Amino acid sequence: MKSAAWLFSGQSTGICRHGSLPTPLSSAGALTGEARWRKDDAEVAVTAFRLQLGMLLRDLPVGTVAELGDLCVAWWGGKDLVFAHLRDDGTRPVEREFDLDDCEWRARREAFLAWLKEPRYGSRAEVRDWVSRQRQL
């Protein structure tokens, strides 16, 4: 898992993909107690979400995806969760996989937590075929 320490560094590291700016760190680059707590809290939330989602998906048929949002899905890849964005052109195939890092979590947190309250599943042939090929390797 990537460290979230850059969020609290004194240097600007740019803008997250979803437009949120990093939070500044002290000039020495050390995390303050409050910043460390926020980072740890976010990491615990991401870990808990991943564990719960993994438990729900791993016993379902191959090719079953959690429909986490209009253009976001996740599935059990045999050993770990895989998160992916769907193409926004009407055809909606898997466009690319992504890591559930701090930036993604912050951008989609509410949708992910809403999904836990009302899970929605679907079946995707492309995911079924991909996972089946991975299991044969």
Image: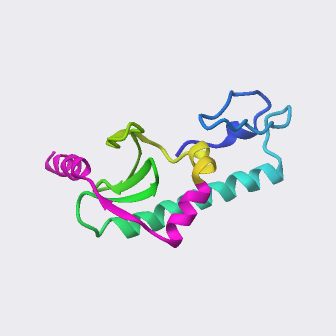
Q: Is residue 71 above or below residue 25?
A: below
> Residue drawn 21% across and 51% down?
125
Q: Is residue 89 left or right of residue 41?
A: left
Q: 121 and 13: which one is in front?
A: 121
Q: In the picture, residue 4 is in which quadrant?
A: top right
Magenta-colored stretch includes residue 57? no
Q: Locate residue 134, reporting x and y percent.
A: 21, 47
Q: Locate residue 102, reporting x and y percent.
A: 61, 46
Please say whether residue 120 is visible from this viewpoint.
yes
Please say whether residue 80 is visible from this viewpoint.
no
Give the main secondary structure of the magenta stretch: helix
Q: Is residue 3 left or right of residue 54?
A: right
Q: In the picture, residue 2 is in which quadrant?
A: top right
Magenta-colored stretch includes residue 121? yes
Q: In the picture, residue 10 is in which quadrant?
A: top right
Q: Residue furthest right?
A: 27
Q: 41 and 108: which one is in front?
A: 108
> Residue drawn 47% across and 64% down?
51
Magenta-colored span: 109-137
> Residue drawn 16% across and 46% down?
133
Q: Locate residue 8, reporting x and y percent.
A: 75, 40
Q: Quadrant of the C terminus?
A: top left
Q: Is residue 10 above or below residue 105?
A: above
Q: Is residue 94 left or right of residue 126?
A: right
Q: Residue furthest left?
A: 136
